[in-house]
Image (spheres, rainbow, N blue to C red):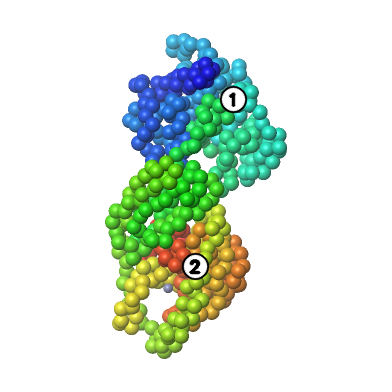
Amino acid sequence: MTHRYRKRIMSLILAFVVIAVSTITVSAPSFATNFSDIENHWAKSYIEIISTYNAVSGYPDGSFKPNDTIKRIEFIAIMVNSQGYDLRSRSEDEYWGQPYIETALNSGLIVSNEYGNMDATAFDQNISREEMASVVVNAYIESGGTIDPLALYDADSKLSDFGAIAAVCFEKAKAAVALDFISGYPNGTFAPKKFATRAEASIVSYKLLLKLGIIPNANLAENIILSKNKLTQGDLLKITVHHATSVSEISLAQDLYSNFKWYDQGDVIEGYIPTNYSTAPGVYSLKFTNSETGITTTRNIEVNQRKFRVQNLTVDTSVESSTRTDDAYAEYYKYFNPSRDVSSPIKYYTESFLLPTKGKVTTEFGESRYVNGALTNYRHAGIDIAAPRGTEVVSANAGKVMLSMPLVLTGNSIVVDHGEGLFSVYFHLDKLHVTEGEMVERGQLIGEVGSTGFSTGPHLHFTMSYYRFNIEPGYMIYGQSITKDNYMELMK
Ligand SMILES: [Zn+2]
């Protein structure tokens, strides 16, 4: 390690001592690498690695508070120290950040009117993402860093909301994207006015130190993110692993779902574990093993019981005898079942799922049924939404139509593949407005409510599934189950 880098790292330590002392607590900062609250956080590996360089610190209680905002002066102090500048000592009763402000101004990290009055009140404000971008790019340039002009040329086309960036920050924000200090949110936005979090400031600091050669280009440990730790029967668990080099690097041993597989999305690998009425409630272990390091990480999840309803249904015996025949089932198995066996390995959608039609929920997900007094051996695969014949039915999300045809049992039926094994299913439609193989948009009209097939009146039977494994659609749309009790509130 050169003298210059050692000096920088010492300065970084000092920066966080100052921050900890001045804004958080008077006790010594904790440089623990096992922060208590980042286990399921996307920035975990970055926070851990820069904390081993003592570049960031947590709180005395062992937490890091990754989602808390960070003040302008706190971020500027990190950047000033990362440049290894000497600071004048602070005089007594002076604002702790004053020497940092002066150095930042003298060295071009900020400009003279950047934060209005440039007093303690202004510097104690939370820093926005566009301001953070501006400071980090200035720090990089001041340190002799260069920017590829070709990367800069189209950087503002990478994210959708560059028009919202303040003029004073615009060029630096473009450079921050070109340099990948800021890569934007999954929905393709920069969110320039949003306050930066401690996690975001950590990753930006990490990237700066990496580009300046202070941190070696080390392999980051994999970072496993579970969409939730507690599920209810019918819920879908999503697992995201950051910093895995390939799907073969991480194996998962678990007893919940036998057909688990990973999807490689480049930056991350993703996989799903569906649950429903067939999943026994209890605590399950997920054991992730890295084939290269041999390290196993165990995470526990809890599946809670749902009280499924029991329904008594009276169906005209002539309807029942004409639709529930061996031939009708054979047709259903032949066309419907395989329509959910092949899914695009890349997601077709970027937005949340929509309820395809509104109306009265008459059957919940997972209900068991007595039809004409006899208990049926199946559970309700989706939700039934009663609505007038002809009511519009839209696609729950972007996807590809895998099936659109009349079937004796389920009437006019549509299956849409959304990618990565997620499917939506629409039965008993009066009219079909799409054809097999067609790409559909989120919210696109695909059919109309009807009463075709084994049906007692106009309604949409809507199912969501992971391949053939049916899940509660409400979790995909509202983050909770859709029931007879809550549907009116949810559908408002
Ligand atoms: Zn139904």
Residue at left 38%, top 61%? 258
Whether residue 357 is situated above or below residue 13 in the rendered picture: below
| Residue 53 drawn at (x, y percent) | 45, 26
Q: Which amino acid type corresponds to the residue marked 2 in the rendered image?
A: Asp
Q: Is mark 2 within 8 Å of ligand 1?
A: no
Task: Indicate the secondary structure of the residue bearing disc 2.
Answer: loop
Q: Which residue is mark 2?
A: 341
Q: Which mark is residue 139?
A: 1
Nearest to the observer: residue 446 or residue 136? 136
| Mark whose residue sits in front, 1 or 2 | 2
The residue located at (34%, 31%) in the rendering is: 62
- Residue 296: image quadrant is top left
Residue 291 locus on image (x, y percent): 43, 46
- Label 1 – label 2 distance at C-alpha: 52 Å
- Based on the displayed image, in which of its 4 quarters is residue 470 positioned? bottom left
- Residue 98: tell me if it is visible: no
Vertical position of residue 271 compared to residue 407: above or below = above
Location of residue 393 with respect to 407 vertically, above or below = above
Toward the viewer: 413 or 437?
437
Q: Is residue 208 left or right of residue 277?
A: right
Ligand 1 within 8 Å of disc 1? The answer is no
Question: Three-letter amino acid code at disc 1?
Answer: Ala
- The single residue placed furthest to the bottom in the displayed view is 318
Q: How many marks?
A: 2
Q: Quadrant of ligand 1?
A: bottom left
Question: Residue 66: horizontal and vertical position, in percent?
Answer: 43, 36
User: In the rendered structure, which disc, 1 or 2, sits on the residue that comes first in sequence?
Assistant: 1
Residue at image position (37%, 38%) is 37
Nearer to me, 131 or 388: 131
Q: Quadrant of residue 58?
A: top left
Do we see residue 421 in this rendering?
A: yes
